[in-house]
C-alpha cells in the first residue's frame, strides 16, 4: 500500500493566515518537510494546494521554498476537497499513482474532504498523522477517529519514510535521518 513508486504526496493549504491559528504547527511543518524531502529523494510527485490565496496568503516558509525548489505543482482552490477542482483531479489521475499521501490543514475540513473523495474514487488514501493539524485538538482527534473508521490509513510521517527507505546505512537513509533527528524548524507566523 505504501510502495514509493506508487505514491503521490499532497500538501493541503499550509497558508499564512490559516497557520497562525493551528495547534502543533512546528511538528506539522517538520513532518511535512520530511515527507517533501523523502518524496524528492525517491522521485515521487508532489502537489500542493492553496485555498483562496488572495485572502489566506501563500504557503508558509520553509515549505514554500522547498516545494518550489523541488518543482512541486501548485494549485489554487476554493472547494474544501481538492478533488472538486477538475485541474487537481485530472493531475492526480495523470500521475497514475494509486496511493495518495495527505498532509496539511485542517485535518477535519480540507484534508478530510479530500480523503473521502479520493477513497470514493478508488485510491489508497494515507493521512500522515503528524503532518496534519487543526485549530483545536478535539477537531484533530475527531478527524483521526473518522479516518480509522472509514478505512483510511493513518500513520506517522516517519513510518512512511522508513518504509520507503527499506534499509539503514544508505545515502538516502543518512540524508533523511538528519531531518528526522534534527531539531524541529521553528516557524514564526505572525
Image: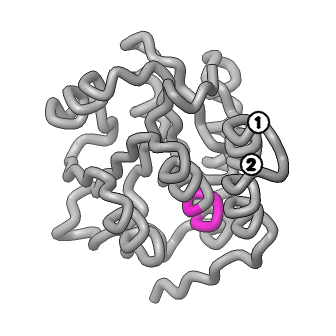
In this view, the residue in front, 182 or 52, is 182
Q: Is residue 90 visible?
A: yes
Give the structural element (helix, strand or loop) at label 1.
Answer: loop
Q: Are marks 2 and 1 in contact (CB under 8 Å)?
A: no
Q: Is residue 30 magenta?
A: yes
Q: Quadrant of residue 116?
A: top left
Q: Which residues are magenta?
A: 29-33
Quarter of the image for the C terminus: give it. Answer: bottom left
- The location of residue 162, given as percent across then percent down, is 76, 43
Lateral position of residue 44 relative to residue 107, left or right = left
Q: Name the residue located 71 percent from the left edge and 42 percent from the top edge.
A: 165
Where 22 falls versus 80 (above or below)? below
Q: Is residue 157 left or right of residue 123?
A: right
The answer to whether one can see residue 106 in this image is no
Q: Which residue is mark 1?
A: 166
Mark whose residue sits in front, 2 or 1: 1
Residue visible at 68% across and 33% down in the picture: 154
Expressed as whole percent of the image width and height from the top left, the position of residue 25 reads 60, 69
Q: Of label 2 and label 1, which has the lower sequence position?
A: 2
Coordinates of residue 140 in the picture (x, y in percent): 64, 48
Vertical position of residue 122 compared to residue 84: above or below: above
Q: Which residue is mark 2?
A: 158
**Residue shown at 37%/13% (left/top)?**
121
Q: Where 30 falls versus 143 (above or below)? A: below
Amino acid at each position: 500500500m505504501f510502495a514509493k513508486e506508487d505514491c503521490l504526496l499532497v500538501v493541503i493549504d499550509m497558508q499564512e493566515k490559516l497557520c497562525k491559528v493551528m495547534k502543533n504547527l512546528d511538528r506539522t511543518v517538520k513532518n511535512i518537510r520530511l515527507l517533501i524531502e523523502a518524496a524528492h529523494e525517491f522521485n515521487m510527485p508532489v502537489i500542493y494546494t492553496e485555498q483562496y490565496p488572495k485572502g489566506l496568503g501563500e504557503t508558509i516558509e520553509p515549505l514554500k521554498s522547498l516545494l518550489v525548489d523541488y518543482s512541486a505543482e501548485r494549485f489554487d482552490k476554493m472547494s474544501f476537497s481538492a478533488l472538486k477542482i477538475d485541474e487537481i483531479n485530472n493531475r492526480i489521475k495523470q500521475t497514475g499513482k494509486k496511493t495518495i499521501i495527505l498532509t496539511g490543514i485542517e485535518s477535519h475540513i480540507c484534508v478530510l474532504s479530500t480523503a473521502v473523495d479520493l477513497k470514493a474514487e478508488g485510491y489508497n488514501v494515507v493521512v500522515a498523522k503528524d503532518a496534519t493539524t487543526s485549530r483545536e485538538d478535539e477537531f484533530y482527534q475527531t478527524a483521526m477517529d473518522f479516518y480509522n473508521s472509514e478505512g483510511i490509513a493513518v500513520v506517522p510521517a516517519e513510518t512512511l519514510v522508513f518504509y520507503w527507505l527499506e534499509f539503514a546505512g544508505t545515502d538516502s537513509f543518512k540524508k533523511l535521518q538528519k531531518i528526522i533527528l534534527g531539531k524541529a524548524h521553528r516557524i514564526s507566523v505572525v
